[in-house]
Image (tube, coloured by chain):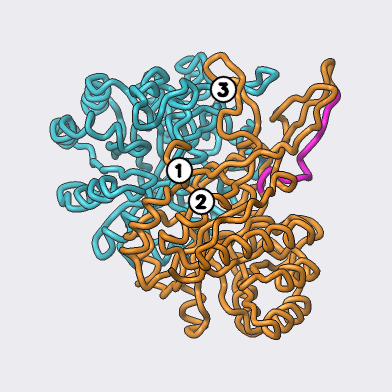
Chain colours: A orange, B cyan
Amino acid sequence: MNRPELICPAGTPAALKSAVDAGADAVYLGFRDETNARNFPGLNFNRKELETGIGYAHTHGAKVLVAINTFPRAGEAALWHAAVDDAARLDADAVILADIGLLDYAARKHPDLRLHLSVQAAASNPLAIGFYAERFGIKRVVLPRVLTIAEIAALNARIAPVETEVFVFGGLCVMAEGRCALSSYATGQSPNMNGVCSPASHVRYIETANGTASKLGAFTVNEFGRDEPAGYPTLCKGRFIAAGKPSYLFEEPTSLNTIHILPELMEAGVTAFKIEGRQRGRAYVAAVVQAFREGIDAVLAGRPLPDIDLAHITEGGKETTGAYEKSWR
Amino acid sequence: MSSIGMMPAKLTLGPVLFHWQPEAWRDFCFRIADEADVNIVCIGEVVCSQRLPFLTPLIPDVVARLKAAGKEVVLSSLALIMSERELDDATALAANATCLIEANDVTLVALLAGRSFAVGPLVNVYNDATLASLEALGATRICLPAELPEARIAALAASARADLEVQVFGRLPLAISARCYAARTRNLAKDGCRFVCGEHPDGMAVETLDEVPFLATNGTQTLSYRYADLLAELPRLRALGIHGFRLSPQQVDMVAVAGVFRAALDNSIDVAEADHQLRELCPNAEFANGYFHGQPGHAFIEID
């Protein structure tokens, strides 16, 4: 069994340092603009910070992957081209791209730059992945969160030498990534076009007769009693009425946590394990990296999995193994 | 801009996205063939591979009837391909040499590269470079994603060699998932779903807790609650160089809906009259045009 790489989020230079110090094999990050899918206020890197961050990571034997994974605006691709050019110039170990046109640009302009296919491309089978490998030379695909472990194992056997990277912890998209416009339907801003989902600029908490309603744009996403903490109104984790009954129709407010199925994921031949959460703080990054570092090392050494409780850093304290287990569907 | 010298407008009937009873679907297609003033008709299962076996035996008759009526027939592919069986279905679809095939996933682009094909609105075409890449691979007809505003449609139209299409009627496809919300609502496993999605032939309405209609689900797909209505925007779309207009089938008189859009494109009725007729035909629907105007997609912007 190969030792999977642990790929950790870095929303800030401080988080990058924490992740590297905690044992990340690589960190992923984005520029402070619309070219990446976590375009949140106060997050991400300018060019100087990236240069310093890459220096720190490389000195400590870790890699830096730059996510440029939104879809360039027609007629305004210069911002996205500059992001690819600067990542290459500053010696990033790979760029993570989703858009066909941008992959084409990167492959032509920087033939030596390693390309990873973003989860935002939602390439879910050998033919789709093969398309990106043959046309643009991608070396790794970040798999959409729609596949079971059995499907991932079968996929790895078919697409080698293209590597796979899967999410193992953190926020969980319910929809196929890069193929969801719920956010722009409510707010005008979407992951694909603006790098944001359910943006904070459109969130309001309204006092009601019974407690608090969380709203995104014009729409109520959830309601909470007086004694309940009001959660963030991420659209696909809201409560809605369908077929006459209120429910978490799409998904409960929950986080992906695969720590207990690590042996199966490693057995499936996955090259890299990815932790979601570029918007999360240093403490989160350090705790999750440390837990998964211990978990992976235990599996490789043939020891039982350590009993690691991450409930305190999951959304609403709830966990799921998501699509990795077929019953989720 | 004068319509003289402009390319003729083409109306496309998009694929039926919902799980209609097979005979009802066939009869709908037959009536479209016989009566609807549309140029192109897309058929096929886009949302759930478990529904495909119901349509497959009916497709040859439907294709023959549509072609005999002078319609161009396009076969639409599944939007999310995960299993071996779904890959086999996609490969079989791509082997069909009698109709243009509409790729709703990059999988089909991979299979169809090197020959003429269409691209559906569920493939991400956001910019001229992606458009050019797909054109180089053989794309001749591309329906743009729902969330693009006018300025982006304009930039794409300015560089396109393929015929571009914009959805102007019907619920907008917003998301696709591996999880089935029809089965989930009924506490059924996806593999034992009993096809309960068929109980909602126009989509299952999703309301907020304060009972504001918001979305609609269709098995694994999420759509807008509101129907797109770009009747008032047709002249601006034409001026940008868009000549393909997609009507996405809903549970209303689609022959009459096509007639309204045709009359509006021909300028034989004005926008106010066309909008009035459309609302008469869809008495239970709400409408949206926000995306075109760079607003939240659910918005309806009144224009002069």
Q: Which of the 4 image quadrants contains residue A296?
A: bottom right
The residue that disc 2 covers is A261
**Location of mark 3 (residue):** B286
Residue A292 appears in the figure:
yes
Chain letter of disc 3 in the image: B
Decide if residue A187 is on the left or right side of residue B182: right
Q: Which residue is mark 1?
A: A325
The answer, for residue B303, to whether it is visible in the render is: no
Is the residue under label 2 in contact with that under label 1 (CB below 8 Å)? yes
- Residue B185, disc: none
Choose between A246 and A259: the one closer to the eye.
Answer: A259
Pick the front one: B13 or A68:
A68
User: Which contiguous range is marked in magenta?
Assistant: A197-207
Residue A201 colored magenta? yes
Identify the element where label 1 is drawn. loop
Q: From mark 1 to mark 2, how far is it between C-alphas?
A: 10 Å
